[in-house]
Every structure is written in C-alpha cells, then in structure tokens.
Image (cartoon, rainbow, N blue to C red):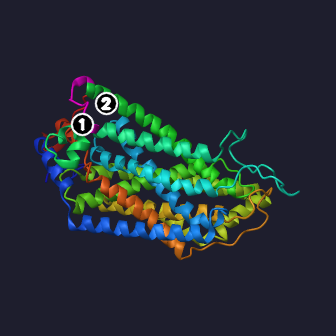
Amino acid sequence: MVAVAENGRYHPEMWVFPVSSQVTADVSAKTHAMPRAFTLALVVSAVMLAFGIIGFIARATQDGFGDYAPWGYYMGIFSFVFMITSTAPLAAAIFRVTKSHWRRPLSRVSELFALVGFFNILAFIPLMMVLPPIFKSGAAEHQMELRRTIWFEVPIGAPHVWDMLGIISLAITGAVLLWLSAVPDMAEARLTATGFRRTVYGILAGHWYGTKRQWISQKAGLAVLGAFYFMILIFVHFMISTDYGMSLIAGWKDSIFPVLYSLTGIQSSLGLILLVMFILRRWGGYRKYIGISLFWAASKILLGVSLLWVYHMFAFGITFWFGRLEVEQNILKYLLFESYGWLFLVNLTFSFFAPFLILLWNPVRRSDWGPALAGLSVVIGAFLFNMRIFVASFNAGEIYDLALESVPPPVWPDIWDIFIVLGGLGAAALIYLSATKLLPFMCVWEIKEGALYQKMDTFIRGRYLVLAKPE
C-alpha cells in the first residue's frame, strides 16, 4: 500500500503498482480458479435462465405471437439487457481513444459484455414476429393505412429485417473488438494453457507474434473499430427506441426520446462496470490491480452523464407540457403522471436523485464503494425505465389511430412475465460469467503496459505519481 499526497491529504491505494513480471501468472491462476461464490453465481444464473425458458414457453403457448401486447415485459427485459450489454464495450473503446491511464483495469470487464450480443440476437427473434407491419390493409375511416415510423419510404423488410441487421452488426463488431483486444493475451496464454483453452487460444491467436508492426496495427484497429462501434450503437439504439417504443403509441412524435434512450444505456453500463469493478476489488482478489483512482475518475463521468440524463428527461417532459395538444397531454399522463406515475418517480429517484446525492461529495467519490453504490442505483433506474416505457408502448391500444385519445391503464406483470424477466437477467449473467473462464477479467497486456509507464517519486516533501505519456 502506498500513501499518495493529494491536495495536502493522504489517500491510501489511490494508485496501484502491479509487478509486470507477475501479472500473467497471477491473472491466469485467478481465471482458472473456481471459488465457491463464483460457482454459486453460475448456478443461480442457470436457474434463473431455466425459469425464463419456462416463462417464455408458457407465454408463447398461452398468447402466441399474433398480438404484441402480452409481450411487453419480454420487450422490457430485452431492451434492458441489450441497452447495458451493447453499450458497455463503448467504455473501453472511448477511454482508449482518450488515452486515459486509469481505465486499464476496466477494459476487459467492459469488452466481455460484447459476447452477450449473440444472446440479444436470439432474444430479438420473437420480437420480430410480434411487431405489427407498417401497412394496415382495410384501415377504418379514423385510422391511418401507414402507421407512424422512421421508415418513410418503407424499404423492403422494414422495420423487422433492418432492426435485426443492426443488432447482428453490433454483436459482430463488438466480438471483433473483444478479439482484437484479447489477441496478445491469448497468444501468451497458449504457451502454458492445456486442453480446450490451448486449442481455442491457438486458433484465435495463431497469427500473433508480438512484432512492432502487429502492435501498431492492433492499436490502430482498436481505434477504428471503436469508432465504428460507437456509430452502429447509436443508430441501433435509435431504431429500437423508435420501432418498439414511440411507433407503438399513436401520435407520439419526439426527437428527444432516442437520445434519452442512448444516455440511459451509457449511464447504466458505466454504473454496472463500476459495480463489477467494486466486486472484483473487494472479493475477487484483484485489489492490487484496481486502485481508487479508477472509481474517482469514472465517478466524475457518471455524475456528468446523470446530469445529462435528467436534462433530457426534463426536455422531453417540458416540450409536451407546453405543447398542450390533447395527444401530448395524454402521453404525459400515460408515461409520467398517471398510469405509470409512481414508477416514473422511482425511476427518477434511482436514475438521478440517488446517484447525484451520492456523487456530490468528494470523500464519497474518492472511495470504491461510493461510485459502485451510485452505479447500482443507475442500473436499477435503467431497469425501471425500460419496464415503464416498453410495457406502456406494447399496451397503448390501437397503433393505427391518428392519436392517443385516452389514457390507458397500467399493466402489471403476471407470473410468466416475472419468469421471463428473471430469465433475461440470468442468461446475460451466465454468458458473462462463463466467458471469464476463457478470457480473464483483466487485460494483461494493458496492465503490464501501464506498469511500465508509472512510478512514485518524491518532490520536496511529498510523494507523487509520475506518469509517462509515450504517445
């Protein structure tokens, strides 16, 4: 433990100094280990997934795929899992581009969520089946033949095929981003690995020998892929939030909601990453790799994103409030004030008030538990956000009407909905935890690289971190 002077005060473990020669063996040992708590988490996740499969079969048998209304909670948990897991790899990509030194321990933690993208593809198939077509033949006099969507010219396959292509593209790009980041680690691990791991590492890292040209190409590839991932992510968020949210409530036209959806994903994914980092630091044995500086730096970003979230939430509400059209007032009553009013208040508390009050204080931000607690809060808030929006959208009534003429009542979950929600959470957790037995939580090459760039030095009477900037 090193005491570091910062503004005249001492903060133990603000920065950590891994021994470069010991990182590979230590992280490899932790990857191969199966602690009791980890095994229990795998079992619980598998049981939750089994409940989800039961709930899905019961819902499909009972209601079929002809009507989308009974699938509101399925859409809610799909959107929650998709929102967080698809946005999480963005943290590694962005912080690499900004050359943030503190982010090194979280790179692999965030990138591993990309593997959940393949589950998202599978889970999206039923939603393609239940989403109604844009064109309605034989529309009544007070109805539209084409419902409101973002697909103005209605290209072939819209919206179903294009939404699926977006999710597939996002999953593949995320997986390639993870592979490119993990190639150096797999190439090193194949020298000592045995059995299945050795085979997988040999196939995936067979081209890597650590030459200077390969390192340059790898870092350039990570930057380019990260930029493409960001562009695809925002576009797919836009499609999902409009096709499965706004377009299913008659008369809902809003340019702010897709931005709010993406901000919720950025906020909640960063919160989940901080929660995972806290668990790894406190109970996972990675304390000597994860310093307080990571939580301190990330907490400032989380605070800023939380402020952005509440600003866009306010902009969404105030625009409709001053519009004063009947349809706008009905949408506000439906989503914010009446039908799901109490759920919105809880959502607002967990997504803004709680993290804002937690992260407002410097001593709390300079701890590992404070940002992690705020992260847990915003994850709960994102869960409530998705349930509120998409359950309401799937149960808003006739989508070919010109406008929402009345305020629909809220729809509460039945036993199958609860099972489906548990199954979605369990599937994501099971995939993520299983992936950590093949690829470690820590990005070994980045940890070792960072260890070469930093040291503690003395200036006058204080000790300070000296950080090299080779690029």
Which amino acid type corresponds to the residue marked 1 in the rendered image?
A: Pro
Classify residue 94 by image quadrant: top left
Most extreme residue toward the bottom, as rendered? 415
Do labels 1 and 2 touch, CB within 8 Å? Answer: yes
Closest to the observer: 358 or 461? 358
Check disc 1: other Cα within 10 Å, few if <14, some if 14-19, many if 20+.
many
Most extreme residue toward the top, as rendered? 213
Magenta-drawn segment: 203-213
**Mark 2 element type:** helix
Q: Which residue is mark 2?
A: 218
Closest to the observer: 329 or 433? 433
Question: Residue 290: x and y, percent?
Answer: 24, 52
* Above or below, 326 relative to 121: below
Side of 50 where 346 appears, left or right: right
Question: Residue 326: x and y, percent?
Answer: 79, 61
Which amino acid type corresponds to the residue marked 2 in the rendered image?
A: Gln
* Above or below, 452 relative to 313: above
Question: Residue 368: x and y, percent?
Answer: 29, 59
